[in-house]
Amino acid sequence: ATASGVGEPSPEARARAMSDVKSIDVGGALFVDKYCDVKIKGMSSGKPSVQSGSCFDQTRPTFGRRPGAHAVSDAPVPKYAATTQSHLWPTPKPTTDRFLRKGDGARVKNGELFATRGGLGNSRTTGLESGTSVSMLPGSRSTPIAPPRANAFGKRDNPPDTQFRKFYERGDLPVAVMSASKNTINWKVDVDKLDYHHYLPIFFDGVREKEDPYRFLAVKGVEDMLRSGGAKILPVIPQLIIPIKTALNTRDPSVVCIVLQLLQKMVVSAELVGEALVPYYRQILPILNVFKNKNVNLGDGIDYAQRKRRNVGELVLETLQLFERYGGEDAFINIKYMVPTYESCVNL
């Protein structure tokens, strides 16, 4: 499908947007934000994963874990009644001792006797201690009769099994952290001489890392390669889709924010990159549709942390707008198909 009338951005607008996006230092901001959170706010620095071990050990393999996998819930599920087309909790079979006796009203008020859908129960029949509420148990009157929550915004599994971590621990990546007034990467070779088909997918796979130095090296490495890649970036786009999709599927806000900022840099990094991403909107945009309206509702307050770029909803909107501007004439209608609430930012 084609949306007619959408024009390409002018060279001046492209240069302005490119300078604005490229001026954002995503990798360097990671250390600054972490320092502020730990040293100033007193937040926990986070514990490394069990598989990481010490800094001298190689990461142990993780078996049976997949990035972005759905968590299996053990919550009880109500049965669906086809006759009433609603969900109903199964009613326990009544027994002869489940009836009101003299003084039971006072016992119900004191929490010694519980009124449930199946009748009456006490601590002996329900298996709970005296005074414990059963309002959250299946069959209680205050429990909503509905399927379990989907938990669409919940974090998914993110095991430390990236290809970047494996290659870095093996010493196959030509990078090292250079500590100075501002943390940068010390490349052992010129960035423009790298094989982008081999290294760029590996660095993109490490973007979902949560531990340093893996996270900083991966994010900063992607930034440096996008800055110096030029025409080498466009042929590698198909190989970047799976790492990007895997990182987005973790649904971790900290990971999603980094991926969105790198997507913005990639779109403006070279010619035709935005148009090359259009066929892969079905893999990238579903998670963006989930987080599109996840904003911070402050009313008339002021969000002083806007410079940290941690608002997922704003980053999603900025990314979609860049996709539309640099994706050609087919971009808007394909974005609209995957994100129905998106409105065009281009003057028709």
Image (tube, rainbow, N blue to C red):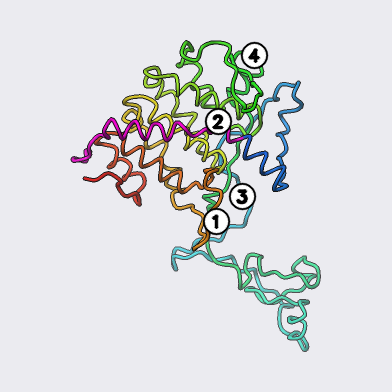
Name the residue rendered at 52%, 36% in the picture. 258
Q: Residues within 10 Å of mark 2 (few under 14, many from 20)?
A: many
Q: Which mark is residue 171?
A: 4
Mark 3 or 1: the one toward you: 1
Mark 1 or 2: the one toward you: 2
Quarter-of-image position of residue 179: top right
Type of residue at label 4? Gly
- Residue bearing the label numbered 2: 207
Sequence-wise, the earlier of marks 4 and 3 is 3
Quarter-of-image position of residue 123: bottom right
Q: Residues within 10 Å of mark 4 (few under 14, many from 20)?
A: few
Type of residue at label 3? Ser
Task: Look at the numbered discs 4 and 3 and tell me whether their residues touch, using CB distance below 8 Å.
Answer: no
**What is the x, y in percent for residue 12?**
29, 32
**What is the x, y in percent for residue 237?**
40, 24
Q: Which mark is residue 73?
A: 3
- Residue bearing the label numbered 1: 149
Question: Separation of disc 2 and disc 3 at Cα?
Answer: 28 Å
Looking at the image, how many numbered discs can be counted on the residues? 4
Sequence-wise, the earlier of marks 2 and 3 is 3
- 119 relative to 67, above or below: below
Mark 2 or 3: the one toward you: 2
